[in-house]
Amino acid sequence: MKARPIAAALAVLGYVIMLVPILFVVASAFTSSSTLSFPPKGFSLQWFGKAAAYQPFTDALVSSLLLAGCATALALALGVPVALGLHRGAIPGRSLLQGLFLSPLVVPELVIGLALYQQLMIGLGQTAFAALLIGHAVLLMPYAVRVTGAALTLADPALEEAARGLGATPWRAFRTVTLPLLRPGVMSAALLGFITSFNNVPLSLLLQSRDFGTLPVTMLDYVQQSYDPVIAAMSTLILAATIIVAVVAERTVGFTRIFGGIN
Amino acid sequence: MTAAAQFIDVSRTFGDFTAVGSLNLDIPEGRITTLLGPSGCGKTTTLRMLAGYTAPSSGTIRIAGEDATRLPPEKRNLGMVFQSYALFPHMSVADNVGYGLKLRRIPAAERRSRVAEALDLVGLGHLAAQRPRKLSGGQQQRVALARAIAIRPSLLLLDEPLSNLDARLRVQMRAEIRRIQAETGLTVVLVTHDQDEALEMSDVMVLMRAGHVMQSGSPAEVFPRPANRFVAEFLGYENFVPASLSASDGATTLTVRPEHLEVVQGEAPDGARLALPATVTGIAYRGVDRHLTLSAPRGEGEDDVTLIATVRADHSRADWRPGDRVTVSARPEHVVELAD
């Protein structure tokens, strides 16, 4: 391959800009002093213990995981059939529908949050979890529709025809050929969706209640009150968990296969 | 000859566009029939209607004597090889070939032996465990063939099967498909835009244009006797001479292949059907051949007739030059009379 020094330098610069601030946070989590500072003074794991033992964080983590899991499942359950329908074409107003399902990317999340807050929580008296679940599912729909749609576009339309010609009913052809080919697309939509929901602040900020708060919002609350290395330790723990998930995903499906379908 | 499939007055329109217009065609059993024509001539639509992927707008399609017009593809028992091969990427070669057998609830042991048999027929028994993407284009093509043959179809349909292969492999596969047809006795319908492919592989060739059959018959019938100007042009007849330049009744145009034109200085040979005075206007050197462009006057202020002749180089005399005055002639058996 031809050496391209400018492109290589830009890539390195990009990684530096992305990674260095994260390294600062990780490093300051190991400090033995009681203030958040860099460079860390001494070495200690005490803040990790404190973060793991701090109940609002553990409660919020459980809430966040539950919410991200349910919202992702709901978004996929609705989004995959929509992607299939849009892909098969022959629907009047197809591009309008396509735009509709992508719109949550464009509409400010605070607007969605406020709307759901007014209608679901105040108007219909729903719980915070129900409102959050619906809000997050709406937010994840574009990923579910687009990423599965991209996987469908890459699949040869003759494949399903070939299955039919060999004797498969339409449902059988879908189940044995189209669905397995869709799997990497659905996996990547799920992963992207889960991460998006897990990290979301604006929607969660509006829709949480005293007994159901997500981890990012709880951490935000914490930072506003006390500025100590617990927050750096918690961030480092989340980072480690994310890396583990990424490695597992890479080993089982392969990142290139998961994200290959996006562009 | 019994018909394995029949098209009776079959039409297919897409909006205002007529892809196929009242087609009547018999597909003879145990032979290779090719549908030949330029893109947009309706050959692929015809094949897709036979396979059940495209419904006819009107007319009847019969397969093995039964009305199959409204039958879905899975009930037709036809083996189709797609242009893209359409191998299932998530299955091994053996599972691809066995897919149709599994759907037919054939017991595992018999399924395995029929998969092996089909793969041996195309010479790929050793690749059964591979994934299709690991295979070369030629090998994928063979897997697609094996998959279509394994179900013991009543017809084998091939949609431009060789167009994605390189030139050398394409010529090999022509012979290969002929061999497989001969060994299995299958009825084959092949779609192609390549006249050489059609000439080499067909028992019956069907030339199509704009949704209509322009001529059909064996290559030996069609090639020397094109029925109209379209077929003549498609098969490489490049010289079209107005019949007025030569004694003929009924015909309006005479056509001759470039390699059948004789170019001499002086008198035309005895018994020539066509003899035109002409001037050499261009010459292309093609190794043993010379590709001559000639101009023959038509007279009375009309444009000259341009002729193309492929002639062997004659080393006993000087090579042709532009401006040479010559006589262009053709023997009677090489001159085809056309009505259009």
Image: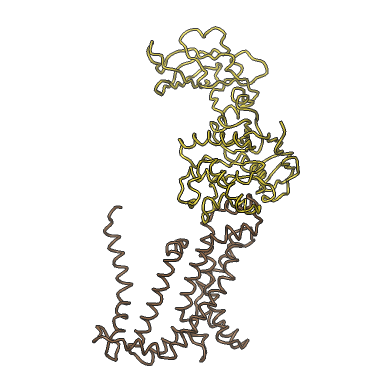
Closer to the camera in the image, A70 or A82: A70
Q: How is the image coloured?
A: by chain
Q: Residue B53 appears at what percent x and percent y?
A: 65, 49
Residue at (49%, 87%) from the top-left corner?
A213
Answer with left or right where residue B297 lies relative to residue A28.
Answer: right
Residue at (24%, 83%) from the top-left corner?
A39
- Can you say whether A96 is above or below B125 in the image? below
Q: Residue A253 appears at what percent x and percent y?
A: 46, 64
Q: Residue A100 appears at what percent x and percent y?
A: 57, 69
Answer with left or right where residue A237 lies relative to residue A171.
Answer: left
Q: Residue furthest front?
A: B109
Closer to the camera in the image, B40 or B241: B40
Answer with left or right where residue A19 lies relative to residue A185.
Answer: left
Q: Quadrant of the C terminus of chain A?
A: bottom left
Answer with left or right where residue B223 lies relative to residue A202.
Answer: right
Colour of chain B, in one word, is: yellow
- Can you say whether B242 is above or below A145 in the image? above
Q: Quadrant of residue A227?
A: bottom left
Q: How many marks?
A: 0
Colour of chain A, in one word, is: brown
Residue at (46%, 16%) from the top-left corner?
B279
Q: Residue B328 appears at what percent x and percent y?
A: 51, 14
- Can you say whether A190 is above or below B213 in the image? below
